[in-house]
Image: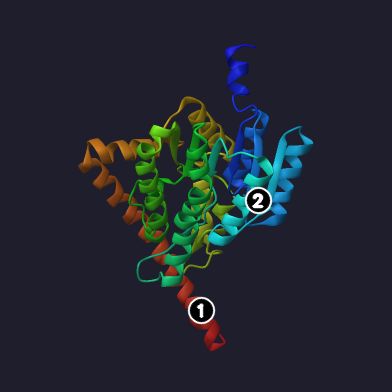
């Protein structure tokens, strides 16, 4: 077997748990991991999408040992899932991947407590629930392994109208930074994935608080986003390459890599870049929000 063949099959026989596997980055990562020989344990909140992913993988010859729908914000449900998986598989996971998440954007004047809470519950507490139930058995088994946490560019940079989203994604970044060192003594590596734009269904469903999703400006913004976005398959390839190479920080966007480098090594450039981005985004988003308020007022008046 050549080196490239070994690279393509480096997950052979390894037990890989993936959240958000119903589609997007999670689904693409599950398909690629299956192609690299992994034995998959998959979950997603959407049972139908998860079943489609599992069926597709199995029809292609991949191995899916478990596919169960769970709301990761429900700790007891995650605990029950972990107990079932460990009982059936007979041993802990080799790789645990926290991919699932949601996104809500909005200005500080439009965001309400429910928006902040929903994002933190899904993007921070969900992964923490998975870590609580799946990583300690890995430690106790003494076999090493890998933890992958998918954060975001919003977990690195001060992106406009991303305060709620960043609350979850910066938090997950902090958890990863600590576990990177805490878990090293057990032979468990950590990868923190910080994608920029990715063309997933989340692009179309992201809630922008106070803005009509059908506003022409938002449609144009989404179109520009997609033009510069990586595919889920490209991000999946970067994730599995990081697992193979034992890499911590995983960039999937050259622009985000540049901005993060500026933040670290040339703060004035970073500040100038973020201020420019903020001014442009505020112009588009605030104008769309004003149009949304006007349409709502007219509807309420029966115009």
Classify 293 as above or below 39.
below
Residue 301's spot in the image, x, y percent? Answer: 53, 88
Could you tell me how far apart the alpha carbons at marks 2 and 1 are, in whole angstroms?
48 Å
Q: Secondary structure at mark 2?
A: helix
Q: Which of label 2 and label 1 is nearer to you?
A: 2
Classify 296 as above or below 193.
below
Indicate the quadrant containing the N terminus: top left, top right, bottom left or bottom right: top right
Left or right, residue 38 beside residue 296: right
- Residue 10 seen in the current view: yes
Q: Point out which mark residue 296 bears.
A: 1
Q: Which residue is mark 2?
A: 84
Residue 172's spot in the image, x, y percent? Answer: 41, 49
Viewer-side residue, 39 vs 239: 39
**Residue at figure coordinates x 35%, y 71% from the top left:** 109
Task: Identify the mark nearer the N-term, 2 or 1.
Answer: 2
**Residue at figure coordinates x 50%, y 54% from the top left:** 129
Density class for disc 2 (Cα within 10 Å; few <14, some 14-19, many ≥20) is few
Which residue occupies the extreme bottom position in the image?
301
Where is residue 177, by image quadrant? top left
Density class for disc 1 (Cα within 10 Å; few <14, some 14-19, many ≥20) is few
Classify 133 as above or below 57.
below
Residue 242's spot in the image, x, y percent? Answer: 48, 30
* Count of marks placed on residues: 2
**Residue at figure coordinates x 44%, y 69% from the top left:** 289
- Residue 224 seen in the current view: no
Indicate the quadrant containing the C terminus: top left, top right, bottom left or bottom right: bottom right
């Amino acid at each position: 077997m050549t080196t490239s063949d070994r690279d393509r099959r480096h997950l052979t026989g390894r037990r890989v748990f993936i959240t958000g596997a119903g589609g997007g980055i999670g689904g693409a990562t599950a398909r690629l991991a299956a192609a690299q020989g992994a034995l998959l344990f998959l979950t997603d909140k959407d049972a139908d999408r998860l079943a489609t992913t599992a069926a597709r993988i199995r029809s292609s010859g991949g191995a899916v040992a478990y596919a169960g729908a769970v709301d990761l914000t429900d700790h007891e449900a995650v605990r029950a899932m972990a107990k079932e998986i460990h009982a059936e598989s007979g041993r802990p996971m080799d790789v645990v991947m926290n991919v699932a998440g949601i996104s809500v954007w909005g200005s500080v004047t439009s965001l309400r407590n429910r928006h902040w809470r929903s994002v933190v519950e899904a993007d921070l507490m969900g992964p923490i629930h998975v870590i609580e139930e799946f990583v300690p058995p890995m430690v106790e088994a003494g076999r090493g392994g890998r933890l992958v946490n998918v954060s975001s560019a919003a977990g690195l940079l001060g992106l406009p109208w991303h305060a709620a989203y960043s609350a979850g994604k910066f938090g997950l970044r902090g958890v990863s930074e600590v576990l990177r060192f805490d878990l090293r003594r057990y032979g468990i590596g950590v990868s923190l994935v910080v994608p920029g734009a990715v063309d997933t269904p989340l692009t179309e469903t992201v809630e922008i608080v106070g803005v009509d999703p059908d506003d022409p400006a938002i449609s144009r913004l989404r179109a520009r986003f997609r033009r510069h976005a990586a595919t889920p398959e490209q991000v999946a390839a970067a994730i599995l390459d990081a697992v193979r190479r034992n890499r911590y920080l995983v960039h999937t966007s050259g622009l985000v890599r540049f901005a993060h480098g500026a933040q670290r090594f040339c703060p004035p450039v970073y500040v100038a870049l973020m201020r420019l981005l903020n001014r442009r985004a505020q112009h588009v988003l605030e104008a769309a929000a004003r149009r949304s308020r006007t349409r709502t007022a007219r509807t309420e008046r029966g115009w």
